[in-house]
Image (cartoon, rainbow, N blue to C red):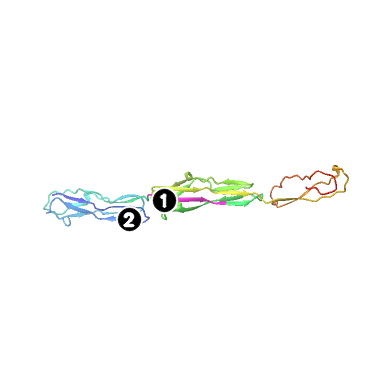
Amino acid sequence: AKSIAVSYGDLTWTYDGNPHTVTGYEATADTDLYDVDADFTFTGTATASRTEEGTTNMGLKAEQFRNTNANFATVTFDVTDGYQTITPVAEVVVTIIGHHSTDVYDGEAHNVSGYDVSISNPLYKEADFTFSGTATASQTDVGTDRMGLDAEQFANTNSNFAKVTFNVTDGYQTITPAAVTITADNKTKVYDNDPSTDPELTATVTGVPAKGVAPVYSVTRAAGQNVGEYAI
């Protein structure tokens, strides 16, 4: 007689962060005279448990089965091992949005750093990917400095997720112009028909930041020496 022990303990789950376990086996014999429930012993452990992506086998082997029925001289055990398989999650989308700031020019360096992360699957964590870029931007003068964030700088390190897509929006630091007012000062002189005696033209400047660069400007007036008012 030949008794065939066939494992039915095979199970596949998609990764969900929880342990999954499969137990037991099914035995059949090539003769009805052999009782597969009573005529042999099993010394193994028909259990397989797994949480992470991959496969764990029970480790069933023919030598773990021993015939106990003397009415059968030769009993051959053909064993198919059981297993627990965890397959990766098909796809996760990670959205990266770089921090950004806009400030008015004040002569100081302004900095912004970091990024916000949102993930389409709660099982996937920020610790499951690496970042090889530099999430900083700095600007002093009027203009914009960008972090240079790019999807290629982010890499998945968790094999429980088959495909991880990174949607990245770059971060930046922008400096806008300061509102500076230049007001020409009123000037007067007594009529002498001589341009060389014109008073020095000056202006009052307001709004320049304490550490800012003073604007460069010139003051001129409309031509004329007759009595009257001339626009500066």
Residue shown at the point (57%, 47%) measured from the top left: 137
The magenta stretch spans residue 169: no
Residue toward you, 100 or 125? 100
Find residue 150 and report its horizontal and vertical position in percent: 50, 45
Q: Which residues are magenta?
A: 90-100
For mark 1, what is the residue? Answer: 92
Side of 207 relative to 225 (left or right): left
What amino acid is found at the position of numbered circle 1 in the picture? Answer: Val
Compared to residue 193, the image places residue 20 above or below, namely below
Q: Residue at x 41, y 50 (%)?
A: 92
The image quadrant of residue 122 is bottom left
Question: What x and y, as percent, mark residue 215?
Answer: 71, 46
Amino acid type at mark 2: His
Residue with the mark numbered 2: 20
In this rendering, position of residue 171 left or right of residue 180: left
Residue 99 included in the magenta stretch of the image: yes
